[in-house]
Amino acid sequence: MNSPMRTVIRNGRLVMPQRIIEGGGLIIQNGVICEIIESGAPSARPGDYCIDARGNYVSPGFIDMHVHGGGGADVMNATVGSIQRMCRAHAEFGTT
């Protein structure tokens, strides 16, 4: 049986609750962070999906508890298209 594909993120600035880890990495499996690497590159296995963060910030998605719109759309428009446009805008800019 094949193990599930993992995502390996390298060379990032990991945003942690109390600090930022420079040059860190993550290993994600089944949608869950299973390892945080504070220095050096995480080991990749054959079949892993690897991302070089290139020194950019790596953070959890932000949760917006209350929105009325986004991407030029508003919930008051009351259309499926407006809601879809809002969802795409929030996803593009890091809101989960």
Image (tube, rainbow, N blue to C red):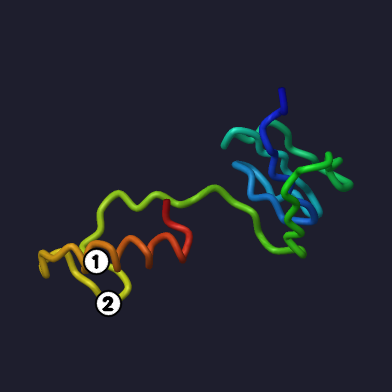
Most extreme residue toward the front, as rendered? 1
Q: Residue at x 32, y 73 (%)?
A: 71
Depth check: give the residue in front, 11 or 88: 88
Please name the amino acid that badge 2 sits on: Gly
- Check the picture and name the quadrant holding the N terminus: top right
Where on the picture, by quarter, is residue 45?
Answer: top right
Task: Give the distance between the C-alpha atoms of the residues marked 1 and 2, in whole angstroms.
Answer: 7 Å
Q: Residue at x 76, y 59 (%)?
A: 52
Disc 1 designates what residue?
A: 69
> Which element type, helix, strand or loop, lies under badge 2?
loop
Q: Residue at x 39, y 49 (%)?
A: 63
Residue 90, horizontal then vertical, whole percent: 38, 62
Most extreme residue toward the top, as rendered? 1
Q: Residue at x 72, y 49 (%)?
A: 49
Residue 69, horizontal then vertical, whole percent: 24, 66
Please name the amino acid that badge 1 sits on: Gly
Q: Is residue 69 left or right of residue 41?
A: left
Disc 2 designates what residue?
A: 72
Residue 47, horizontal then vertical, whole percent: 77, 43
Depth check: give the residue in front, 65 or 89: 89
